[in-house]
């Protein structure tokens, strides 16, 4: 979908919601899910998709010379690949993912090689009239793992600068600007805008031969859910990037779970905690932050709820990294960060030059039963139509 949030903008959904580590799996998923979504959302115009290829699938595309096959599939079916999600390197739908999603880190050559492969593929998939593509990526690694290795962040910066050099050559060869966008996430080495600004100033720019290349090819993927979970104002974060000269290359439009314990009595807090427990599933990590003085951070939701088994939690708001549908504002005693989504969408064009917007609700199949849709395609289409409604409202 083009021009929803300003001229030259593209909006789509992220296909990391679909399981499958191989290229054939991805094509089957697009047939099964993306094409029905397109019929409901954009039957007469191309629809944006944020593609997800594992390292295995990306190598298959290149080594088996299948870029043309993928391009023809997208062209025939009216799907526009404008961005890649390059965060999950391996199988994002195995029974237990948790901390594995942060491997390999950016100090590992495998992460660099994978991202270069994605950039080369994306440059060939972009339509002729589209000259900019984005790849969201890991924010270096899980904080503790990075900090346990004294040289990890330094080598990560070197690899990112090598990537910027490759992307420079790629643009010279193809005329396509592909930027790679670091995606801050709770608990990672970069989990707030302050972390990102410090990393650019203190590590990336020091390792780079060209400040221009760093700022042109290395940007930020602003995930609304992640920022909201850290209790970081959307506007403050976007302004901080702008003031530091760091571009926002992509906005991942995502919605987090809120437990409003600060607005509930003792009995309601116990009931709300029981409702929140339904989100403590085994596959993904669901970082949780309690908005106390200094904020209390739990690396996973089960750790948070276990502290208050059958007693009421303290009267402070909790926010949990669980991507719930964008159209949800509240359910039962729980709420969402939908107001943060609306705030970001209302101000992002004023504060950034971002052209890429990607709905990224990847946890449909692990949602509590009462929040699931009849079909995955129906849920995704409902989200994208909600986004279209918000864009229309903002443009009036």
Image: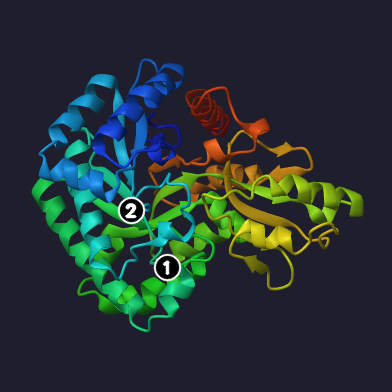
Q: Is 217 left or right of 293, judged from the image as shown? A: left
Residue in the picture at 29% in, 79% down: 206
Circle 2 is placed at which residue position?
Answer: 89
Q: Residues within 10 Å of mark 1 (few under 14, many from 20)?
A: few
Mark 2 and mark 1: Cα distance apart in space: 29 Å
Residue in the picture at 38% in, 26% down: 34
Residue in the picture at 83% in, 47% down: 271
Q: Locate the C terminus and report the quarter of the image it occupies.
A: top right
Residue nearest the viewer, comparing 10 with 378: 378
Decide which of tag 2 and tag 1 comes sooner along the chain: 2
As helix, strand or loop, the secondary structure at mark 1 comes to loop
Looking at this view, name the residue that lies furthest to the front: 95
Q: Are marks 2 and 1 in contact (CB under 8 Å)?
A: no
Q: Locate the N terminus and report the quarter of the image it occupies.
A: top left
Q: Is 378 left or right of 294, judged from the image as shown? A: left
Residue nearest the viewer, comparing 31 with 253: 31
Q: Which mark is residue 329?
A: none
Measured as percent of width and height from the top left, residue 134 is found at: 31, 48
Q: Is 97 left or right of 91, judged from the image as shown? A: right
Examine the rendered structure and indicate whether residue 70 appears above or below residue 261.
above
Q: Which of the two discs, 2 and 1, sits closer to the camera?
A: 2
Residue 212 visible at all: no
Residue 245 visible at all: yes
Measured as percent of width and height from the top left, residue 146 is found at: 41, 74
Q: Picture quarter containing residue 10?
A: top left
Residue in the picture at 37% in, 21% down: 35
Circle 1 is placed at which residue position?
Answer: 244
As helix, strand or loop, the secondary structure at mark 2 comes to loop
Measured as percent of width and height from the top left, residue 76 is found at: 23, 20
Examine the rendered structure and indicate whether residue 202 appears above or below residue 25.
below
Residue nearest the viewer, comparing 349 with 162: 162
């Amino acid at each position: 979908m083009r021009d929803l949030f300003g001229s030259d903008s593209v909006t789509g959904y992220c296909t990391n919601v679909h399981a499958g580590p191989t290229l054939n799996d991805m094509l089957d998923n697009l047939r099964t899910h993306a094409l029905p979504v397109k019929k409901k959302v954009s039957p007469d115009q191309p629809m944006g998709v944020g593609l997800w290829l594992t390292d295995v699938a990306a190598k298959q595309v290149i080594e088996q010379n299948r870029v043309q096959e993928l391009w023809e599939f997208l062209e025939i079916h009216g799907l526009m690949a404008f961005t890649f999600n390059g965060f999950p390197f391996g199988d994002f739908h195995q029974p237990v993912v948790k901390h594995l999603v942060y491997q390999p880190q950016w100090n590992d050559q495998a992460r660099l090689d994978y991202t270069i492969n994605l950039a080369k593929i994306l440059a060939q998939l972009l339509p002729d009239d589209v000259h900019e593509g984005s790849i969201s990526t890991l924010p270096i690694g899980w904080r503790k793992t990075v900090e346990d290795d004294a040289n990890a962040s330094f080598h990560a910066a070197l690899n990112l600068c090598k990537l910027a050099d490759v992307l420079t050559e790629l643009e010279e060869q193809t005329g396509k600007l592909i930027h790679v966008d670091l995606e801050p996430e709770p608990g990672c080495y970069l989990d707030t805008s302050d972390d990102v600004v410090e990393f650019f100033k203190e590590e990336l720019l020091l390792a780079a031969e060209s400040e221009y290349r760093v700022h042109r090819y290395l940007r930020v993927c602003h995930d609304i859910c992640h920022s909201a979970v850290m209790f970081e104002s959307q506007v403050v974060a976007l302004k901080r990037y702008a003031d530091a000269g760091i571009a926002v290359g992509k906005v991942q439009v995502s919605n987090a779970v809120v437990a409003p314990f600060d607005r509930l009595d003792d009995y309601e807090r116990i009931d709300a905690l029981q409702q929140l427990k339904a989100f403590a599933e085994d596959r993904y990590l669901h970082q949780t932050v309690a908005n106390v003085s200094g904020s209390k951070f739990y690396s996973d939701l089960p750790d948070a709820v276990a502290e208050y088994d059958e007693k009421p939690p303290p009267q402070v708001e909790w926010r949990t990294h669980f991507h719930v549908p964008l159209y949800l504002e509240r359910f039962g005693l729980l709420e969402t960060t939908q107001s943060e989504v609306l705030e970001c969408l209302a101000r992002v064009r004023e504060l950034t030059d971002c052209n890429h917007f990607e709905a990224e609700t990847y946890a449909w199949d692990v949602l509590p039963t009462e929040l699931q849709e009849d079909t995955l395609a129906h849920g995704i289409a409902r989200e994208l139509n909600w986004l279209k409604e918000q864009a229309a409202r903002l443009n009036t």
